[in-house]
């Protein structure tokens, strides 16, 4: 695998402009790039961590939220997926699953070495799917890892599972309502401000309609982070959380958060208040 060392985090405004231009031109090859991106010494600014925690519902703690390193790695994801060699336009991708392992506490102000690559292009019943993997190391030791599964719609015929490693969801657990969420209409813009993810479908109803949505929708990773925040104080210093993104959460709106014990932790789900539609299912457990 070819390694590309980055001197600094890529500029997201530049990458978003590239995402639009690349989508208008013929695509790259049919295979995922055999390349990894490496960024050393990525700093976790304490003020950035605090702003993220406020938007996602976390309290003030001496370790960053387990979902926070995702936003540090996001510019690397965008750089890889907007490259001309990438087989799909990033504007047509759907984030369908995410699994994070926190292997050790990470303090605000820490510096992490980020490594990112893609693998396992495979069929999905609605198109093709692949995994984006990230590892974050401190002093040479991996302290955090992530597997994000993305779907490219069109020409389906395979399995609908998000990731071969993601197996536990809330489907088989007995869940009870833990909270009713009121999700404000500006949560997409607020999360974009702390994550850098300014996909138009999250920003405003008008921009979302241009991409076929009746109104703006919440970021899947904001929803997952909000679920993780509900389990603060109940997990060890090392834990894993996985989620399957089922259906968009329209904003402004309401959602029902449910949870229940499993053999190794908790299962959870985010649904419409009447329970007719599921936005997210997932599980969290100590390692």
Image: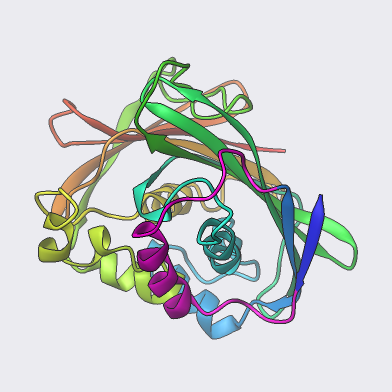
* Left or right for 11, reference 113: left
The answer to whether residue 252 is visible is no
Residue appearing at x 56%, y 38% in the figure: 30
Residue 239 figure quarter: top right
Check if residue 9 falls in the magenta segment.
yes
Q: Quadrant of the C terminus?
A: top right
Q: Which residues make up the magenta segment?
A: 6-33
**Image height of 77 relative to 123, above or below:** below
In this figure, which colouring scheme has been used for the structure?
rainbow
* Looking at the image, residue 15 lies above or below residue 147: below
Query: Horizontal placement of 261 versus 178: left or right?
Result: right
Is 279 contained in the magenta span? Answer: no
Q: Nearer the viewer, residue 59 or 270?
A: 270
Rendered image quadrant of residue 259: top left
Between 90 and 284, the one lying in front of the other is 90
The picture places residue 204, in percent across and down from the top left corner, at 16, 66
């Amino acid at each position: 695998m070819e390694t590309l060392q980055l001197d600094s985090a890529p500029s997201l405004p530049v990458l978003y402009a590239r995402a639009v231009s690349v989508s208008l031109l013929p695509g790259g090859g049919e295979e995922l790039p055999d390349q990894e991106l490496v960024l050393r010494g990525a700093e976790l600014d304490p003020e950035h961590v605090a702003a993220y925690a406020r938007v996602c519902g976390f309290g003030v703690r001496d370790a960053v939220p387990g979902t926070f390193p995702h936003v540090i790695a996001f510019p690397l994801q965008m750089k890889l997926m907007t490259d001309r060699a990438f087989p799909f336009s990033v504007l047509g991708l759907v984030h369908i699953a995410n699994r994070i392992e926190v292997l050790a506490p990470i303090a605000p102000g820490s510096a992490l070495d980020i490594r990112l690559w893609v693998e396992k292009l495979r069929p999905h019943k609605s198109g093709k799917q692949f995994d984006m993997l990230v590892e974050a190391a401190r002093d040479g030791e991996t302290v955090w890892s992530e597997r994000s599964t993305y779907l490219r719609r069109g020409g389906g015929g395979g399995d609908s599972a998000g990731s071969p490693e993601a197996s536990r969801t809330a489907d088989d657990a007995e869940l009870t309502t833990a909270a009713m969420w009121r999700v404000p209409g500006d949560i997409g813009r607020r999360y974009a401000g702390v994550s850098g993810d300014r996909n138009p479908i999250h920003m405003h109803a008008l921009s979302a309609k241009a991409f076929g949505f009746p109104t703006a929708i919440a970021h899947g990773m904001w929803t997952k982070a909000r679920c993780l925040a509900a389990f603060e104080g109940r997990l060890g210093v090392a834990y894993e959380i996985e989620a399957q993104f089922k259906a968009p959460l329209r904003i402004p709106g309401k959602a029902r958060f449910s949870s229940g014990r499993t053999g190794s932790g908790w299962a959870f789900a985010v649904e419409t208040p009447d329970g007719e539609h599921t936005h997210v299912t997932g599980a969290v457990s100590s390692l």
